[in-house]
Image: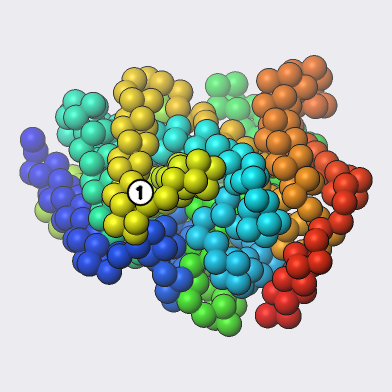
Amino acid sequence: MTSAQICILIAIVVYLLAVISVGLIFSRNTKNVGDFYLGGRKLGPLVAAMSAEASDMSSYLLMGLPGLAYLSGIADVGWTTMGLAVGTYLNWLIVAKRLRNYSAHCKAITIPDFFSLRYREKKNILMAIAALVIIVFFVPYTASGFAACGKLFSTLFGVDYHVAMIISAVVIVGYTSLGGFNAASVTDLMQSIIMTVALIIVLIFGITQAGGWDAVITNAKSLPGYFDMFNTYNAESNTSSSYGALTIVSTLAWGLGYFGMPHILLRFMAIKDPNKIKTSRRIASVWVVISMTIAILIGVVGLGVVNNGGIEPLADSETIIIALSDLLSKNGVIFALIAGVILAGILASTMSTSDSQLLAASSAASENILGGLFKLKLSEKAKMIVARGVLIFIAVIGVVIAWNPDSSVFGIVSFAWAGFGAAFGPVMLLALFWKRSNKYGAIAGMLAGGIMVFVWKYVIANLSEVLNVYELLPAFITGLVVNVVVSLLTPKPEAEIVEEFEAVKHYQ
């Protein structure tokens, strides 16, 4: 192992020890399942904002966006980030405060809990369906996070992929199972800071290696369609292709996914003071816009570095930030330690999402299926044991799914985003803002949206080029329409449900 690798490893180990320490600290204050899954609703505005966004972005921010910008130019990433930025802002603006107040009023501590209690659904069918949706989409999503950690260590240090992946999973499970929601949220804040530092350092270093900002822009403009929001660049043929209106609308639809993301919605439910949500919204929106913009610029700058001879052409465009970090580490001990911080940022971006997904999947299995559907009565101590046991069990399944280093588990990420957005998004919006919605509409809408994700992706999208749009858009519309129609065709909600809706509305 070279001295540069040793310095990188030191920085990463320090980071891993820090997140485990956070888990140990918060384990003392995690006394019941309400603390474990929702932190006792004690999140401050800064932690709420940054933990929500760090758990949202995952390795997509530090690897996906730069890699896509490097490969095809600014159109695809540009429209995607616009959709994500608008979705983030609207989610904080219209959902956060209402969900915080409504969930506190009905004493819900998970998303399936909220749906069931909102509609007084006594048979817990809605709760069970919501819990199954979370498990189906989050377990493989979590596996992709374990795989990312394994591949990072394996690539950097030549460590066996399986060993690296298991160690990473143990660390994530360790601090999450010890400290629960609070540990995950505070470590997410730490991770968002590390991610931000990593992005800024890589961007500045990359610009110097590319020959300056003017050289970066000149290089980008010389490539057909690369610097154009309505065309994309094809590196193999050195040509451009049109990025049409239908593709733009489909790409912008990514923003709809936010209304159904359980790990983000849980942050809203956990906020201590709903009157400070405006502060959280501003922090979250500004951080998302700035961080995604820097991530895109890293891809553009990285291509400039490659064309300037600083880095060999990449076989995998998503490794551009790793390649730049490796180049930085060769400039001495200090720069190697800084490179370690950057790579810890990649690790942080993955871990910040995996811990939140583990908690959401664990709560769905233990609290909503075992406790809600099967009516398993346990003491608070027993509930904590079950909660941690289920979390570990789900993590083991994730490790099994991620066992093959060549598996395409990363392809599940966009599909899972569509699944949550279509199944939960319309139900959440109507539950919060339409008092005529009822349990029949919610059940039908959730099933219709979730099923349409599969039907559109694997059947309808293949029928015509015009229909080949991101499955989230048609599935979201389907879920929304079905929810409204079924609600109108079935009995009105009971008076007590309407009264609670009106009471919560006045909290605003």
Circle 1 residues within 10 Å: few <14, some 14–19, many ≥20: many
Numbered-mark total = 1
- For the residue pair 22 and 506, the one nearer the viewer reads as 506
Q: Residue furthest right?
A: 489
Is residue 310 visible in this depiction of the protein?
A: no
Q: Quadrant of the N terminus?
A: top left
Q: Position of residue 365 (x, y in %)?
A: 45, 42
Which residue is rendered at x = 20% and y = 38% of the image?
167
Residue 26 lies in quadrant:
bottom left
Residue 473 lies in quadrant:
top right
- For the residue pair 192 and 423, the one nearer the viewer reads as 423
Q: Is residue 445 left or right of residue 353?
A: right
- Residue that carries the numbered disc 1 in the rendered image: 387
Q: Position of residue 21 (x, y in %)?
A: 19, 61
Q: Position of residue 463 (x, y in %)?
A: 80, 17
Is 49 placed above or below 490 here? below
Is residue 389 visible in this depiction of the protein?
A: yes
Residue 201 lies in quadrant:
bottom left
Which residue is rendered at x = 23% and y = 34% of the image?
166
Q: Position of residue 467 (x, y in %)?
A: 80, 27
**Of the residues shown, which amino acid type is indicated by label 1?**
Ala
Colouring method of the image: rainbow
Which residue is rendered at x = 24% and y = 62% of the image?
27
Q: Quadrant of the C terminus?
A: bottom right
Q: Secondary structure at mark 1?
A: helix
Which residue is rendered at x = 64% and y = 42% of the image?
125
Q: Is residue 239 left or right of residue 48?
A: right
